[in-house]
Amino acid sequence: MPRESAGLLLYRVRLGELEFLLVHPGGPFWKRKDVGAWTIPKGEIGPDEDAFTAAQREFEEELGFKAEGKFIPLKPVRQKAGKIVHAWAFKGDCDTTLCKSNTFRVEWPPRSGRWQTYPEVDAVGFFTFEQAKQKINPAQVAFLEELQRQVVV
């Protein structure tokens, strides 16, 4: 059974152009990665949790505020490692400088016995379609394309 996660894609219109909110994963593995490393705010679906509830929970944990609005379901995608990602889009805005992520602990360097705490998300930004296509995990480009087809700017 493939792992599944769920997330929300916040979008806005600025100067007649669609912009997407993406997050950069925190921690040492992602520190020097940029192109193809960004993602929608998302996370694993809990054992007794439906995908949309998980998406809302993860959005709040990773950004520090609740998602509100009319949610547009997007077709799930399968990432390279096999994980299935479910997503919903919604229109809104936020001050990315006020976003505050939860944290996680990891042994770093591996097998060193040293445990370090990192933010789950270390950067947040709004990107145009062309910028977002470069930044986002390649499988998630489908979310951007689907939403761009549905939203009238």
Image (cartoon, rainbow, N blue to C red):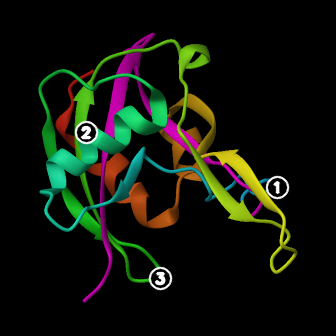
Q: What residue is shown with label 2? A: 56
Disc 2 residue type?
A: Gln
Instruction: Say the numbered circle drawn on residue 32.
Output: 1
* Quarter of the figure with residue 72: top left
In the image, is residue 8 part of the stretch drawn in magenta?
A: yes
Q: Percent from the top left, x then y, of residue 151?
A: 21, 31
Front position among marks 1 and 2:
2
* Quarter of the figure with residue 76: bottom left
Stretch of the chain drawn in magenta: 1-29
Q: Nearer the viewer, residue 100 or 10?
A: 100
Task: Assign a secondary structure to mark 1.
Answer: loop
Number of on-image labels: 3
Q: Which of marks 1 and 3 is nearer the N terminus?
A: 1
How many angstroms separate mark 1 from mark 2 (CA)? 28 Å
In the image, is residue 113 part of the stretch drawn in magenta?
A: no
- Seen at 46% across and 30% down, the residue is 63
Q: Earlier in the sequence, mark 2 or mark 3?
A: 2
Q: Could you classify mark 3 by the number of other residues whose Cα lies within 10 Å: few (under 14), some (14-19), or many (20 or more)?
A: few
* Residue 78 visible somewhere in the drawing: yes
Q: Are marks 1 and 3 in contact (CB under 8 Å)?
A: no
Front position among marks 2 and 3:
2
Q: Could you classify mark 1 by the number of other residues whose Cα lies within 10 Å: few (under 14), some (14-19), or many (20 or more)?
A: few
Q: Percent from the top left, x then y, of residue 35?
A: 68, 55
Q: Which of marks 1 and 2 is nearer the N terminus?
A: 1
Disc 3 residue type?
A: Ala
Disc 1 residue type?
A: Arg
* Quarter of the figure with residue 140: bottom left
Magenta: predominant secondary structure element? Answer: strand
Task: Assign a secondary structure to mark 3.
Answer: loop
How many angstroms separate mark 1 from mark 3 (CA)? 20 Å
Q: What residue is shown with label 3? A: 81
Quadrant of the frame with the C terminus: top left
